[in-house]
Amino acid sequence: MASLSFVNVCKTYKNGLTVVKDFNLDIKDREFLILVGPSGCGKSMTLRMIAGLEDITSGELWIDGQLMNMTSPQSRDLSMVFQSYALYPHLTVYQNMAFGLKVHKVPKDEIEKRVGRAAEILHISHLLDRKPSALSGGQKQRVAIGSVIVRQPKAYLMDEPLSNLDAKLRSQMRVELAKIHRELGATIIYVTHDQVEAMTLGTRIVVMNSGVIQQAASPNDIYENPVNKFVAGFIGSPSMNFFPVWVARRGEKICLEFGKNKLIANEICSKRLVEDGYVGRRVYLGIRPEDFHEEGPEEQKILFDVEMKEVLGAEILFHGRINREEICVRLSPNVKAEPGERLPVYVDMDRIKLFDMDTEQNIIYV
Amino acid sequence: MNIKTFVKKAGPYVYMVPAMAVFAVFLFFPFFKTIYLSLYKTNKMGQAKLYVGLLNYADLLNSPSFFNSLLVTAIFVVIVVSVSMLLGLIAAVLCSKTFPGIRIFSTAYALPMAIASSSAAMIFKIMLHPSIGIVNKILGFHINWISDPKYALACVALLTAWLNSGINFLYFSAGLSNIDETIYERASVDGANSIQRFFFLTLPGLSPIMFYTLVVNIIQAFQSFGQVKVLTQGGPGESTNLIVYSIYRDAFFNYRFGSAAAQSVLLFLIIMILTLCMFRLEKKGVSY
């Protein structure tokens, strides 16, 4: 297993387009690192640079204390799951899984043992004699994962490995991957855009946007303490609601006002807003859908017009508007409200986030 | 049966008439005429005069010259097919990478298919000339390539292989572009070096197109004529007397159309049996 280190890594195409900018990150041994971000943010490119499939334009990539910039992919001793499966079409499932071991000249009985075990974990033992063309998307993806876990490389690279599985299989595979990580003690670098995967699997999440690391922290930290508006909006599903609000002093209290709604900031927020000179200015107020409640004190009440509701069984998502801003509220199924009605909800003021209007940085980031 | 159902049933056949007419005139008629002629002794105009049954075939099977033709043809086919496929494959693999000037190389490798075999043979004749030829000049030899029975067949075969390599290059290039690039990426991350990638991925990936190319090349090699006609006329002795050239000589020099027709029929049978065998083998050897 290995530790990785990025030092000022950049990737620029010949046409001048920079897809990864000044990437600095240390990945510890046995870490399960998740790279998340919107499409085209450079997360897959970063993974491919680690694998050696893309040249690094500038900067350094170190694996286990060795500079890897000029090392060919086959000499890096890594293993990668591709989003498009990348199964060898002329080989059976068994041969596909054994390929990496075969080229490393692992003895035949050892290959058999490892492939058998991986096939059991992934529930594909009955498919070992089939060719990839006779497999479904989900089965192909499991074979791709199997081909990777049979080896014991320095690090596993996974590019959206669960993206084509159905919901049930995906949650099963999540558990299996977490188990594999624990059992093998492996360093895993995992690219995804699935929030649940990122939050449940990762020991650390790196949120990227436009080729730049926005925040690298534990899943809980990323969720509770996002560094900026982008991270706050990207992590969490449904995503955080943002409202431009006025910060105003009303007597002793600091109020956040938007439209006819007026929320009283708690002590910590008030202190930070006053100290940083935000009184009398506009900021973004961020509230997660689950931080609204059906009941609460009057000064935390806001009213919104319900436009649509999604009944999810254990909860209901209400979509609507406050002034012109869209809002999504997650409430218990007891709440009876129909589209067209005006619904009062109460904001948990201890959990709100505030962001600077210009820099979009989290004002109460700790 | 009313008219409507008749039209409905006959319709598809009517559509096939133009194509079948062309086949009938240029393929079926000559084919059956050849079988017919092979059973007769003919006059100098190629008209069937005397029915002899299988006598033409019996004569052929007792003729050492015919067996020599078969042997020469077999050697020729083996050299042509193996060398031309190898050349095409190497060129295609080289051109599958992108680098500046790739189009110039691609065009150069594909060019032989645009050259008529007889004109290529003319050029080779000059290149292989014992006193003024560039080959002897470069190699410093004084070999009479075309007039020496040791070298003549190899020269004709290599010329044909080079001519065929152009179309093979195209076939293999198409085959290579069909192989998914990501499996190479995966293999390289898995630790496979370029030689392993070639033997474990490229060759099996090319196997369907390789089979097709093999069949076409064998048939083509059996039917080579122009280069022999220009370069060696079957000589020296009978060292380059390929079956097709032997057929031509029998028919248009010796006016033995019956014997030539019988040779044609045997050539047809040989090619057909070979092709059937290859299709049998395809099921075992071709991946996917």
Image (spheres, coloured by chain):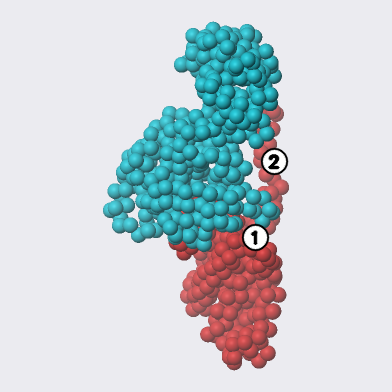
Q: Which chain hosts label 2?
A: B
Horizontal placement of B246 versus B194: left or right? right
Q: Residue B14: which disc? A: 2
Q: Position of residue A156 (x, y in %)?
A: 43, 48
Q: Position of residue B129 (x, y in %)?
A: 65, 87
The red chain is B
Q: Residue B252: which disc? A: none
What is the tally of numbered marks visible in this picture?
Answer: 2
Q: Position of residue B19 (x, y in %)?
A: 69, 49
The cyan chain is A
Amino acid at circle 2: Val
User: Does dot 1 land on a helix, a strand or a loop?
Assistant: helix
Residue situated in front as seen by the camera: B26 or A172: A172
Amino acid at circle 1: Pro
Q: Quadrant of the N terminus of chain B?
A: top right
Q: Residue at x 70, y 70 (%)?
A: B116
- CA distance separating discs 1 and 2: 23 Å
Q: Residue B30: which disc? A: 1
Q: Residue at x 53, y 39 (%)?
A: A215
Vertical comparison of A146 with B80: above or below: above
Residue situated in front as seen by the camera: B27 or A31: A31
Asked if residue A240 can be seen in this view, the reply is no
